[in-house]
Structure formats: C-alpha cells, structure tokens
Image: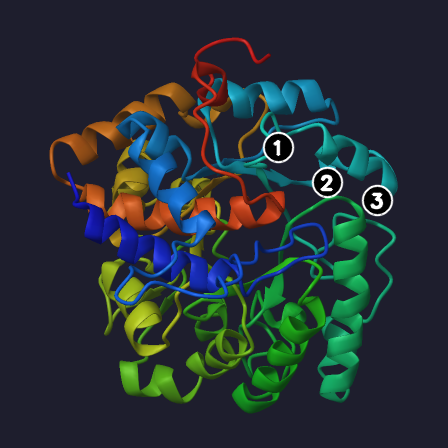
Amino acid sequence: MRGRCGTRRAIAAALAVSLAAVTACATAVEPPPPPLARIAGAPPLLDPTAVYLEQRIASMSLEQKVAALIMVHVPGTDPARIRGVIDAHGLAGVILMGDNVGGPAAQVGQLTAALSSEAGLPVLTAIDQEGGVVRRLREDEFPAARTIRGAEPAVAEQAFVDRSTLVSSAGVLINFGIVADVTPDSSSFIRSRTLGETPEAAAERVAAAVRGEQGRVLSTLKHFPGHGASPDDSHVSIPRSDLDLAQWRATHAVPFQAGIAAGAPLVMMGHLQFDRISALPASLSAEWVAILRDELGFEGVIVTDDLLMLQRSGIDAYRDPYSNAVRALQAGNDLLLYVLPGDPSTVGIDIDALIATLAAAVADGRIAEEQVDASLARVLALRRAASGQSGPFVDCGPKCWGASPRG
C-alpha cells in the first residue's frame, strides 16, 4: 500500500493538469480565497479538490480502483443500457462510436446527460471527432486534415473551435480528435488524417487545434509516438519502424511536443513498435511512457488506443486480452480503452473478469498500487473538474460502485 505522501504527490500532479483543462461543461474548481489574516506558522490551506480525491481514493478497493481506469464502448442509443454497464462495474466512462449517434448533436446530448449516476463525479464521455474521414457527429462540415494541411495555422484553430463547440453541444467531454502524426509517405494509412506536410508544419497546426479546443472539450493528441513512422494500419497489425531515438526526436516527436506545450490534457498511445527504442508496441511499453512523461514533460492522462486492436494483429503474443490489459497498466497507461461489441464475449472479454485480473495483478505486485493510485488521481481529477462541484467527499455507498441498484 502506498503512503499518504505518495497519494498527495499524485493528486497534486493530477490537479495541476485537470484544473488547467477547463471545458465549457467542465469548469475547474477554484481553490478557496485566503483568509484576511493567518496565524504565523499555520499549515497552508488545503485545496478542497485535492482533499476530495485523497479521501475518495482511500475509500476504494483494488477492484474499484482498476475499474475506474477502464473506458468502454457500449453499442446503441439507449442511455439506460449504457449507464447500466457503467454503473454495474464502476467504469471511468464510455467512448461514443457511430452506432451511438442516432441523430444531431442535441439528440446525442440527451443521451450523454443520462449517463452519470453521481453528479459530483460524472463519467468521462469521449468521441473520435477529427473531421473529414473520421467523424461521428455528422453536422461536422468544418475544415479537416485535407484542407488544414495546406492552410495557415489560424484555419486549424478556427476549425477546432467550431468542431469542439459541436462536440461540447453533444455533452461529450473528451475529443480523441487531434492527429499529431506526420508522414511524407502518400501511401501511408494515416496520411489522409495528418495536419502538416513536415514535422514543423504539423506542429504548428496541432498546437493551433489544441488552442481551438481549449475551454470547450478536453483535447487528445494521437497516436503517440507517431503513426506516420510506418505505412501500416494499426487496426489490423503492429506497424513497425527502425528509427532510433535521435531520429524520432527530430521528426515524429515534434508535433506531440507542440501539442503538449499548448496544453493538451490527454495523449493516446498507439500500437506502434519502434524496434530500436522498445521491443513492445508503445501501448504496452514502459519505455515509451517514460519518454512521454520525463522527456516531453507530459503530466496529463495517457489513454491507450483500443486494446482490441492488439488481438486483431494476429500476433500470438497479443491474443490474450487479459494479458494485454495487465501489460498496458504495468507500462503506466492511465486509461484502458475497449471498443467493445454488443457481446464482449465474442472478443474474449468479460468485464468482471477483466477487473478481477487487473486487481489480482496489483495484489500480487505485478502492478504497483502506487502507480494505480497516481493514474486514478489523474483520471478522477478530470471527472471531478467536470462536475463543477467543490464540496467534501461523501461516501455514497455501494450504489456508486455498482454493488447495488442505483437510487
């Protein structure tokens, strides 16, 4: 078990990011103003959100902790069904795919408004809204990659102002929408979705996109460490590159650095393997998480790309979804993403078994609980900021964690 000091350090780091990532529907909680006079030598005032997070994490079992680091897709437009899955397992949130969008953004907003059981800790809702070839909300006719690549950065900024306004109007908190990849290869799978012809040009437009989304949605940079390093499709393979670290720093790192500097609160880890840097796909690689954290200085939430994509690669080492989950959390990812079908068993997944497997890995020391708590602090800080509330933590009992019918 970790000590209180370790928990507080993790929470302080999480708050620094989440409180900077203010959205229109997710206003960060302001710390209380200082009193007119203080007794000399008195301890500093405690931030109410930090206290809330520390108490909340301390109240959670291992199963509840790891469940709160999982985001899934639940097909369909029935909010009761989607909320039922979230509540039954205590999950972090859901990603909306095309089958969840039954109409205009306002209609999607009615769905998302019905997904949270607890006002003080809303679920995270996410969507892939790049524009162009990747868009879930069909009203999005704003400039996308093909136009942005040949235009000034100001065009990218305004496009993502408009795009994020649309996403926010649908009640969605996170946009998995800013492609920070770059490639000169016109045959590359990712080429049509990149925002610049060179690392420097992409960096300018990625930073502009992040600025455009600020105050509306939580921006996500993808697919770290750079899908453009290989022409292959990570949905059905593990794209590989022989670039070394110095070559990566000079090319594919540049747009991600710019997006992080602009304030993006999330980065998505791709299933991309740079053989001279790590023997594993980045989504399972502690080396790549360390580079993102320590070299690029990213302090926000690291989310994996859909972990089912690893299974579809056909590589024996990645056929077991439970092993993949353990390795992803071991590596230091904060949020595990699963785009599940209607019947998860068809892809070898049972959510209860997934949670139990991850909790067992923490219990037996394969995954450090201190690391889990740090990830949980980052994820819960985003959720708490989205609530707009600043009151103290109150344990609402089993209903918050799916152990009884919600009331």
The answer to whether 47 is drawn above or below residue 380 in the figure is below
- Give 114 or 321, whichever is nearer the viewer: 114
Circle 3 Cα neighbour tier, 10 Å, few/some/many (<14 / 14–19 / ≥20)? many
Q: For the residue marked with disc 2, what is the amino acid?
A: Gly
Write the residue at 75% across / 31% down: 111
- Image quadrant in which you'd find residue 351: top left
**Is disc 1 placed on a helix, strand or loop?**
loop
Q: How is the model colour-coded? A: rainbow
Q: Position of residue 129 (x, y in %)?
A: 70, 56
Q: Residue at x 38, y 54 (%)?
A: 46
CA separation, marks 1 and 3? Answer: 22 Å
In the image shown, does 136 or 391 lie closer to the viewer? 391
Residue 259 in sight: yes
Q: Is residue 387 left or right of residue 296?
A: right
Q: Residue at x 52, y 81 (%)?
A: 258
Which quadrant would residue 295 be assigned to in this image? bottom left
Q: Is residue 269 visible?
A: no
Mark nearest the camera among 2 and 3 is 3
The residue that label 3 is drawn on is 105
Q: Amino acid at mark 3?
A: Ala
* Vertical comparison of 392 with 268: above or below: above
What residue is disc 2 on? Answer: 98
- Total label count? 3
Whole-percent x and y of residue 400? 49, 22
Ranked by sequence position, the earlier of labels 2 and 1 is: 2
As drawn, 308 above or below 299: above
- Residue 119's disc number: 1
